[in-house]
Image: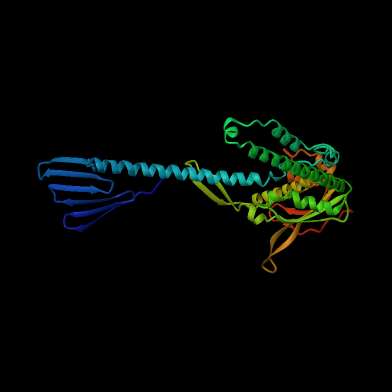
Amino acid sequence: MGLRFRKSFKIAPGVRLNVSNKNTGLSFGGKGLRYSINSNGRRTSSVGIPGTGLSYVSTSDKSYKSKAYQTQRNLQTQQKQLRSEQEKELAKYEVDVFENQCELVKSIHKECDDYVDWANIQNSNPPYQLEETGPKEIEAIRNYENYKPKFFEWLFKREEKSYSQLSKQIKKAKVEDEKAYKEWEELVEFAKNVLAGDIDTYFKVIEEMNPLGDLSEFGSGFEFSTNGPSYMEVEFDVHSNNVIPREEKKLTKTGKLSIKQMTKTRYFELQQDYVCSCILRVARDLFALLPIKTVIIHAYDDQLNTVTGHEERILILSIKIDREILTGLNFESIDCSGSMNNFPHYMLFRKTKGFDLVEKITINE
């Protein structure tokens, strides 16, 4: 129940100020005639004849007769309503952004680069046979042979200029055909090197195709290394402090925005799902691009060292992922954190403290 108060004090002879928790009023006059004005616009007049018990009381609200004033009041009311609606829309937007961010950090693994079939590229047919005329040149020759000058071209003797332009198009088309054939040769040779397990070619594939480029808004600093053609090793920083929200946003029953500090368990749960989702995504992208059997991933994050008072970069998850096992997982309904148990890994995680320092896993483990 809300508290109410009312206070009245005299400020001059015949004048009294009334104060309450809702409004303020001013009354003045003598025993026979008294006039009161309230801050909400209500006015009260009372007239009485002393000694007779007869009195007259009239109450009226403040109203403007001028159309301009009436319009102003209506516009002010509309403005308040618009502000209220805008505040509710903004509150809903902020909650939607928060909920989307929470869902997004758990869904990174659901996206993946398209599979590259290097064997199919290696066995692909050339754009045309070298002893034959290229397709673009054939089209240009056909245009030249089928050209018929229009009336005005014939009248003003412009057909020679048109034939000259068509002749140039034939030469240009031949150059384009030769370029296409050369690119095909290079791509086939590139595919052969990939299938042969050439490590330098592996790195060229990663550099050219940039498989983890869209993860830059999440993790960063991806470093690739390998000592053999059967596996690839990756190190990266997850930057969970910049990705996982610290505050939880909800809508109240009246549509207003409620912001509260996210609980530790909720924060660390999101952090673990985010890190593990990134791990799965990195492995999927590399398996899609390279004919390797294993991906070793080391995830780093910045954590506060309570002994020194400074943040330090530590290894929080190290895992060795097998292609065959990963391919058999259902990524739409998988629990990212639990899926780590399918592979050899090092991870120390507590619900109320999050990740802790671990050692690197090796290819031989």
* Numbered marks: total: 0
Judged left or right of residue 326, residue 260 is left
Residue that sits furthest to the bottom in the current view: 308
Q: What's the residue at 82%, 39% (across, down)?
A: 126
Residue 149, image x and y in percent? 63, 32
Question: Split into 4 quadrants, where in the image is the N terminus?
Answer: top left
Judged left or right of residue 252, residue 8 is left
Return the residue nearer the eye: 356 or 47: 356
Residue 304, image x and y in percent? 68, 63
Quarter of the image for residue 183 reads: top right
Quarter of the image for residue 144 reads: top right
Q: What's the residue at 12%, 43% (across, down)?
A: 48
Q: Is residue 86 something that shows in the picture?
A: yes
Colouring method of the image: rainbow
Judged left or right of residue 24, residue 54 is left
Position of residue 128 relative to residue 362, above or below, is above
Judged left or right of residue 60, residue 245 is right
Residue 267, image x and y in percent? 65, 51
Return the residue nearer the eye: 114 or 184: 184
Q: What's the residue at 44%, 42% (across, down)?
A: 85
Q: Is residue 291 something that shows in the picture?
A: no
Return the residue nearer the eye: 39 or 47: 39
Residue 245, image x and y in percent? 61, 52
